[in-house]
Amino acid sequence: MEQIPSPRASGRRPGRSDVEYEYRTITMSRETTRSEARRLITEAAEHGHWELTRVRLYLGGRRQVQLRRRIVRVVRPG
C-alpha cells in the first residue's frame, strides 16, 4: 500500500542557522484512498511530531508526501 523509508536528516534551513529539520517521504499507490492517506499522515503527526511539508500527485494517481520535524539539539551548560 505505502512505502515508508527511514527518516533522513537534512542540512540547515537557509536564513535560519538555529533550525534543523529531519525529513520523511511516504509514497502511496493509486489504490490508497484519500481517507487512508489522511489517516496515515494524521498518525505520523500525532505520534511522531511530524508536520506536512509537501504533497505531490503524479500522473497515474501515485502520491508522494513529504513530512518534516524539527531536530532539537540540547546544549549542555559548561
Image (spheres, grey):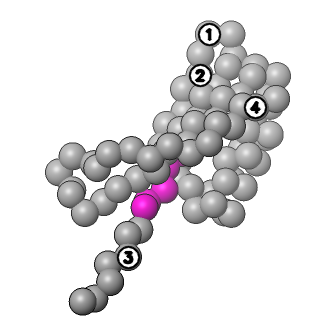
Q: CA distance from mark 2 to mark 3?
A: 37 Å
Front residue of 50/8: it is 8
Label 3 element class:
loop
Sequence-wise, the earlier of marks 2 and 3 is: 2
Quadrant assignment for the C terminus: bottom left
Instruction: Tell me which amino acid carries mark 4.
Output: Glu
Front: mark 4 or 2 = 4
* Residue drawn at point x = 80 percent, y = 40 percent: 36
Three-letter code for the amino acid on which mark 3 is drawn: Val
Q: Nearer the viewer, mark 2 or mark 3?
A: 3
Q: Are marks 1 and 4 in contact (CB under 8 Å)?
A: no
Of callouts 1 and 4, the N-terminal one: 4
- Compared across the picture, whether 65 is left or right of 44 comes to left
Q: What whole-number distance in Å separates the C-alpha atoms at marks 2 and 1?
A: 7 Å
Check whether the beta carbons of the residues at disc 3 and disc 4 lie within 8 A of each other.
Answer: no
State yes or no: discs 1 and 3 in contact (Cβ < 8 Å).
Answer: no
Q: Residue furthest left?
A: 15
Q: Residue at x 76, y 48 (%)?
A: 39
Amino acid type, residue under disc 1 in the picture:
Leu
Residue at image mark 3: 74
The answer to whether the residues at label 4 and label 2 have Cβ atoms under 8 Å apart is: no
Q: Main secondary structure of the magenta part?
A: strand
* Disc ID at residue 57: 2
Residue depth check, mark 1 versus mark 4: number of the one nearer the observer: 4
Rendered image quadrant of residue 59: top right
Read off the magenta span. 67-71
- Label 4 packing within 10 angstroms: few (<14), some (14-19), many (20+): some
In this figure, which residue is indicated by the disc labeled 1?
Answer: 59
Q: Is 21 left, or right, of 50 in this rendering?
A: left
Calculate the distance from the C-alpha at mark 1 to the C-alpha at mark 3. 43 Å
Q: Does the magenta segment cover residue 34?
A: no
Q: Which residue is mark 4?
A: 2
